[in-house]
Amino acid sequence: MLSTITNFVLYHTPVFYLIQSVWRDEAFSYFMAKPNLSQVVVNTANDFNPPLYYLLLHFWIKLVGKSDVGLRFLSFLPHLLSVYIAYLIGKKLASKKMAVFLSFFTFFNPMLLYYALEIRMYSWYALFVFITFYFFYTKNWKWYIISGVLGLYTHSFFPFIFLAFISYLFLSGQANKKNVFYTATPFIFYLPWLPILIVQFFNSTNSWMFPVDFQLLKSVLGNLFTGFEGTPGNWWGYSGIISLFIIATILPAFFYKKKQFFLVVTPILLPLILILSYSIIKRPIYVNRYLIFVTVFEIIAIMLGIYSIRNKNIKNALCFFWLVFVITLNVSLSPYHKKTDFKTSFYEINKLANPEDFVFTKTPIGFLESVYYFRDEQRVFVYNPNKIAIPNYIGVNIVFPNISKTSFPQNSRSFLVADDASYEVVIKDL
């Protein structure tokens, strides 16, 4: 009985995200943050996102070392802070009771909880969205500017938040000089990074991002709320239905809390319209996690919609339904977030390898995980006999620019690792 419960908790709840093998983007974060601070900024400028998270991770590595669980806790801490800020938002927009609901609703949201247990910047990104929104609503401009600047230096899509806020000011008739000036002020502190952002954007034309199709359009709200990105494949229909439920729950706020409705819906609709339109007309830039700020406003909007309902029994029933629903989603979706198990493979390789042995990966896809888990980072390379250029979006070139090798070293033994983390031993004699 105990083993059954343990197995369920470890492999069918978000605890699984905490203990499973790191994947390429997480390993990338580690190596981006590992060098000295100036090199971290230089590396970040050659990537896509601003440097704040990597600078935080740099110091966190000094505390916890190369521990999967320890490194992931740097993302869990802002998630807990987001829960607290959500409570404050709930009290301001609704009531103490709804604030408690919003806190639990935020904690268990599957999109936020998944990225709260990943070695990436997205949980910090969500936190600064919560904080910036709270101080925008309360017009605490000093802390609004501070949180806004931190958000801008956390993710390249954060400017959409301010665009939405300014648009809301005009929609609500609050667009006086003072409000617009303070709302836009964080951009002043972002100006040093703006030229880098522009260069990054034009350098990202060679990308792995998938085209936007009708299937995504009709299910985008559900995708962003659940963190669904295509696995399992039969969830596309469910995601569309979830989108409809989200709209239906939010809608009462339009009739009874119109001002607050536009406050929380504008940061959902305006960025989505702009990003999806650009993705269809020009080139794909839509990625679920890049729009995690939409998830934040979906959560707040659902709370506001429930609060707007006059019937107490319906209100309580909806609170109960949504909480049960997000907890169920976490259980249902957790196994589908499984990463390739490089950790187990390298546990074996590290036991078998001698100090003079090498590791090669069959493609660049598995390189970052391999160099992360192998005990000697200097002896890991990509086997590239055809000298194929490694795309920048894989992330290898920024941190490891010279790791392609056309042959195995003479008189050596190498572990050749495939993208699925299987491996074979290659012995090269003179």
Image (tube, grey):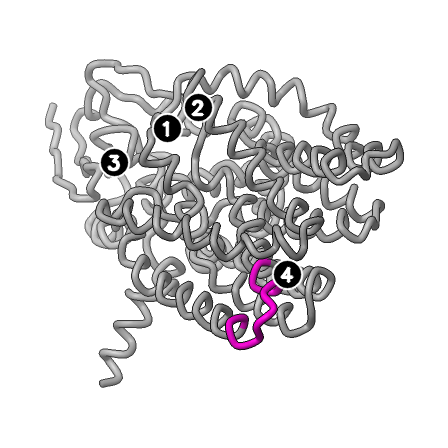
The numbered dot on residue 337 is none
* Residue 249 spot, x, y in % from top left: 50, 57
Per the image, the residue denoted by label 1 is: 212
Is 280 drawn above or below residue 24 in the view shown?
above
At mark 1, the secondary structure is loop
At mark 4, the secondary structure is helix
Q: Residue at x 40, y 60 (%)?
A: 18
Residue 196 covered by magenta stretch: no
* Distance between mark 2 and mark 4 Cα atoms: 31 Å
The numbered dot on residue 279 is 2
Q: Nearer the viewer, residue 310 or 218?
A: 310
Per the image, the residue denoted by label 3 is: 358
Per the image, the residue denoted by label 4 is: 86
Residue farthest to the bottom? Answer: 1
Q: Mark 2 or mark 1: name the one nearer the start of the chain.
A: 1
Asked if the residue at tag 1 contacts the one at tag 2, i.e. Cβ–Cβ closer than 8 Å, the answer is yes
* Residue 182 spot, x, y in % from top left: 83, 37
Q: Disc 1 marks which amino acid?
A: Val
Q: Residue at x 30, y 51 (%)?
A: 238
Q: Mark 2 or mark 4: name the one nearer the start of the chain.
A: 4
Q: Disc 4 marks which amino acid?
A: Ala
